Image: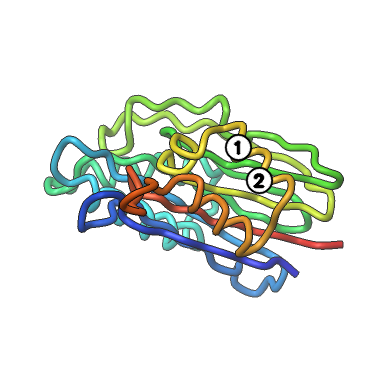
C-alpha cells in the first residue's frame, strides 16, 4: 500500500502559483499518479499555466497511451495555445509495482529514498529552459526500480532552494510522513514572519515493507 502526504502554501503573496495532483491509478490499488507544476513568476499567467498543465496531464494520462515525454509535450502545446497562460515547470510520474517512471522540465525535483537510506535525485538531468508554455519545452525522462521501504519526494524549488539540498536529503533519509513534511516546512519558513520565501509544495509517497 502506498501512503500519500501533501502540503502546498503560497510564499509571501496571496496566490499560490504551484499546482499538483496525486491520485491512485484507476483500477490499481497499489499505483499512484503524480503531477507537479510551478508557475513562473515575473510575468503574467504563471499560475494559470501551472494549473492548466497539471489538470491537462491528469486528464491525458488516462487518454493518451504514450510515453511520459510525449504526453507532457502535448501539454506544453496546450499551454502555449492559451493566450492568458504564461510559463511553468512540469513534472509527472507514475509508481506501480515498486517502479517509478516519469519525465520533467524545469527546476522542481523528485527524490527517491530506498531501503536503508540510498537516495537518488531522479530529475538531476532535466532542463529548465525552454519552459512549458513556450511550445519548445524539452522533457527528460527518468525511471527507477524501488526497494521497500521507499519514499518518493516531489517538490517545487521553493522547497529545495530554501531548505537546502543537504538538509532535504538528511530529512528525507531520517523522517517520513507528516513528520518529514513538517520538518521541511520549519526549515524553510522565515524566522520572524513564519512565511515562505516562495511557493512551497511537497508530495510524498511512501511504501513500507
Question: What residue is drawn where x is 31% and y is 52%?
Answer: 193
Image position of 172 with respect to 134: above or below: below
Task: Assign the C terminus to one quadrant of the image.
Answer: bottom right
Task: Where is residue 90? Give x, y as percent.
Answer: 41, 43
Q: Residues within 10 Å of mark 2 (few under 14, many from 20)?
A: some
Q: Residues within 10 Å of mark 1 (few under 14, many from 20)?
A: some
Do the residues under discs 1 and 2 have CB atoms within 8 angstroms? yes
**Would you say 51 lies left or right of 32 here?**
left
Q: Nearer the viewer, residue 208 or 68?
A: 208
Q: CA distance from mark 1 to mark 2?
A: 6 Å
Task: Where is residue 23? Give x, y as percent.
Answer: 54, 67
Q: In the structure shown, which secondary structural element does the residue marked by tag 1 occupy?
A: helix
* Residue sitting farthest toward the front: 192
Question: What residue is drawn where x is 83% and y is 48%?
Answer: 147
Task: Where is residue 155? Give x, y as percent.
Answer: 50, 46
Determine which quarter of the picture holds residue 136: top left
Image position of 165 with respect to 196: above or below: above
Task: Please tell me the numbered disc located at residue 167.
Answer: 1
Q: What residue is pinned by disc 2?
A: 171
Question: What residue is drawn where x is 68% and y is 48%?
Answer: 100
Q: Nearer the viewer, residue 102 or 1?
A: 1
Q: Nearer the viewer, residue 185 or 139?
A: 185
Q: In the structure shown, which secondary structural element does the residue marked by tag 2 occupy?
A: helix
Task: Where is residue 125? Give x, y as percent.
Answer: 56, 25
Question: What residue is drawn where x is 24% and y is 51%?
Answer: 47
Colouring method of the image: rainbow
Image position of 149 with respect to 129: above or below: below
Amino acid at each position: 500500500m502506498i501512503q500519500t502526504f501533501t502540503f502546498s502554501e503560497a510564499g509571501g503573496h496571496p496566490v499560490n502559483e504551484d499546482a499538483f495532483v496525486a491520485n491512485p491509478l484507476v483500477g490499481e490499488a497499489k499505483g499512484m499518479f503524480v503531477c507537479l507544476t510551478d508557475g513562473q513568476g515575473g510575468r503574467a499567467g504563471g499560475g494559470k499555466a501551472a494549473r492548466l498543465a497539471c489538470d491537462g496531464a491528469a486528464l491525458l494520462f488516462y487518454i493518451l497511451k504514450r510515453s511520459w515525454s510525449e504526453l507532457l509535450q502535448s501539454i506544453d502545446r496546450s499551454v502555449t495555445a492559451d493566450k492568458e497562460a504564461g510559463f511553468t515547470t512540469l513534472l509527472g510520474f507514475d509508481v506501480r509495482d515498486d517502479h517509478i517512471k516519469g519525465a520533467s522540465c524545469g527546476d522542481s525535483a523528485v527524490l527517491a529514498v530506498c531501503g536503508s537510506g540510498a537516495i537518488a535525485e531522479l530529475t538531476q538531468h532535466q532542463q529548465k529552459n525552454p519552459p512549458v508554455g513556450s511550445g519548445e519545452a524539452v522533457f527528460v525522462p527518468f525511471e527507477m526500480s524501488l526497494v521497500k521501504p521507499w519514499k518518493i519526494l516531489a517538490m517545487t524549488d521553493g522547497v529545495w532552494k530554501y531548505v537546502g539540498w543537504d538538509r532535504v536529503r538528511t530529512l528525507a533519509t531520517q523522517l517520513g510522513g507528516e513528520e518529514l513534511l513538517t520538518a521541511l516546512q520549519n526549515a524553510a519558513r522565515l524566522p520572524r514572519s513564519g512565511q515562505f520565501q516562495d511557493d512551497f509544495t511537497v508530495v510524498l509517497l511512501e511504501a513500507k515493507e
